[in-house]
Amino acid sequence: MSRILIRGGRLIDPSEGLDCIQDILIDKGKIKAIGQNLFEMEAIELNAENLIVCPSFIDLHTHLREPGQEYKEDIASGSKCAVAGGFTLLISMPNTIPAVDSPQVASYIIQRAKSVGLCKVLPSGAITMGRKGKELTDFLALKEAGCVALTDDGSPLMDSKLMELALKRASQLDMLIMNHCEDDKLANGAINSGVVSSLIGLSTRPKSAEDVLVARDCVLSFYTGGRLHIQHLSSPLSAEIIDFFKSKGAPITCEVNPYHLLFSEEELFLSGANAKLNPPLRDKKDIEILLNALRAGIIDCIATDHAPHAIREKSRLDSAMPGMIGLQLALPLCLKLVEDGHISMSKLVELLSIAPSRVLKLKDPPKLKVGAKANITIFDPKREWILNEFTSFSKSKNTPLWGKTLKGKVIFTIYEGRIVYSDV
Ligand SMILES: [Zn+2]
Ligand SMILES: [Zn+2]
């Protein structure tokens, strides 16, 4: 394994209190030295002047679509998107075909990702068999196969008794329960309940649908002590509920999708079905409150909910599959939050790397520290680029940002001491 010398970058790692211009030397997959004017005869030198060097990103919410829907994405194309977006660890969602409700499917995903070799993929297992919400999966078997978390994402787990049992069992095994919180009776439509829905007359998924289930899950986490992670938070009241239960000591964390912070429901007029996701885009006032919750630490981290779909599945707003691709877009979207003064650059690194590693309780999180595994992302916050057929690694194109000019680009991604992505 070759040595790598990262020269002259701005090193940012809030977990180490680091924000300075220095060099990093990588040897045998680990960080060997951090300092000024490092020298190493046989190293590959990466010029990081005017670039930001930080612990690599972790995505708690990726749909890789393999097995079963490889026409949308597969583990190879998803891994390429990941490293081009600065991610070296993905938590894949279990709504594959078949669902990840058995150790065999979990092992298949881990093995496929290993053979692709670009980044690590840890599967989340389904909470219930076939994600049908009726019968719990074998949590221990899924954990032994390598699942780090459990969720029926795409479908909320509606049965409260089953959720209580899931939280209890998961806490005995120190596993994380994640839930897509939208009551399926209240959320039976396509878009947010608001000005846009009343103008175009589509059925809705109101914030109340999210709030009801977030509240229930927080209550159950509080009583059982089971670790709960709320997926893709979009409702301001849900943030308040989470804040309340966190203050009571309940082991709750939550994520937000960057699209929910940067796009309001009016985007539907511009992008149609490509702006449809679950939970749906909300209104501008909601975004403001979510940004406050993000700054206040009520929302723990950013997760992409990378959800590729074929063009034919995005043809009509009412019947379109929900979701957007996001792995290559998370960085430019978050940099827009920095540029607009909502968060600092250090907070961006916290939200994309440090905080998700804490949610997962990773034993060896990405860190800019001597002795740590070299999992490092190097990006140019100012580089402009366009997401199109030549730059996107996804098999799908479902995003309002397709063909748009973006600001902020990953230049190198280093995974366990290997350069797995480079754009120079
Ligand atoms: Zn979901
Ligand atoms: Zn999802």
Image (spheres, rainbow, N blue to C red):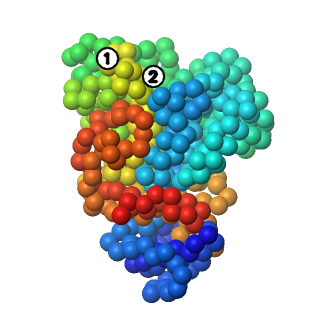
Q: Amino acid at mark 1?
A: Arg
Label 2, secondary structure: give it: helix
Residue position marked by numbered label 2 in the rendering: 209
Q: Nearer the viewer, residue 235 or 17?
A: 17
Report if residue 404 is visible in the image: yes
From the top left corner, tell me how far across and down residue 273 is, in percent: 31, 24
From the top left corner, tell me how far across and down residue 200 is, in percent: 23, 15
Q: Quadrant of residue 341?
A: bottom left
Queried on whether the Cβ of the residue with tag 2 lies below 8 angstroms from ligand 1, the answer reads: no
Disc 1 to disc 2: CB gap under 8 Å: no
Residue at image coords 38%, 52%: 331
Q: Earlier in the sequence, mark 1 or mark 2?
A: 2
Query: Image height check: is 383 above or below 248?
Result: below
Residue at image coords 34%, 15%: 318
Residue at image coords 21%, 26%: 269
Q: Amino acid at mark 2?
A: Ala
Residue position marked by numbered label 1 in the rendering: 316
